[in-house]
Image: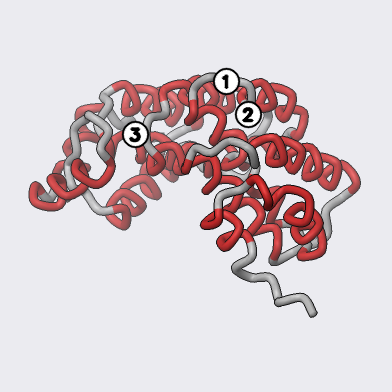
Amino acid sequence: MSELTLEQALDALLAHADPERAMGMASYHKAMRTYLGTPNPAINDLVKDWRADLSLEDRLALASALWETDIHEARVAAAKLLVQARIRPSDRAVWDLISSWVPQFDAWAIADHVCSAGGRRVMAHLSRLDQIETWTRSEHLWTRRAALVITLPLAHLNFPSPEQQAARERVLGWAADYAKDQSWFIQKAVAWWLRDLSKHDADRVRSFLDQHESVMKRFAVKEARKYLAPTR
């Protein structure tokens, strides 16, 4: 396996930087950190090569170092380094690193990239829902939101196993509690979960909305119903 230092990784990200784009990103995301303006396709290409060349241990070390820079694109790259469906023999170190980042979330883009990587670790070990359930009681909005975003793969199953179905229902229980939370980002996360689930289990989404849409914001109900056929 070849070695890649943090400095080399940052230089590679900087080689695709666009200062004008960076200004727009800073205004859009509003989180106070450095933005390079490196587009996601360029980050994807770089990380694809890094994942191929580095051992899991080296990827973990690089991801941790990239995250600590607090540069937007470096944090996105850190998350993408950990995207992997199957990790043998153990993915515990990957999960521990991902979950350690959750309390630091402060904007949706980085949070969603991390949750995309974390969702694979959740599906590998559904017992992690016990830990994620503690996030639903956090005072930190982004941690509460992460509980739904990181479990989205459960909404995408056409034929869930009994264990997966139970896990799906568990998350829908959290979403029911969240339905009363008037925060825009929480409402959006509930709507996102329901919208995606509606493609695979429309009746369950209708049942959820029958019970909870009266306390949800109008935009969230509309989003949740986006792919549902009108009822007669």
Which residue is depicted at the point 78% across and 56% down? 210
Residue 4, placed above or below residue 218:
above
Classify residue 182 as left or right of residue 157.
Answer: left
Q: Residues within 10 Å of mark 1 (few under 14, many from 20)?
A: few
User: Which residue carries the number 2 mark?
Assistant: 91
Amino acid type, mark 1: Ser
Q: Residue furthest front?
A: 214
User: Which residue carries the number 3 mark?
Assistant: 75
User: Which residue carries the number 1 mark?
Assistant: 138
Residue in front for this viewpoint, 80 or 218: 218
Q: Quadrant of the C terminus?
A: bottom right
Residue 222, placed above or below residue 50:
below
Which residue is depicted at the point 77% across and 28% down? 127
Quarter of image, res 58 = top left
Q: Residues within 10 Å of mark 3 (few under 14, many from 20)?
A: many
Residue 102, placed above or below residue 179:
above
Q: Secondary structure at mark 1?
A: loop
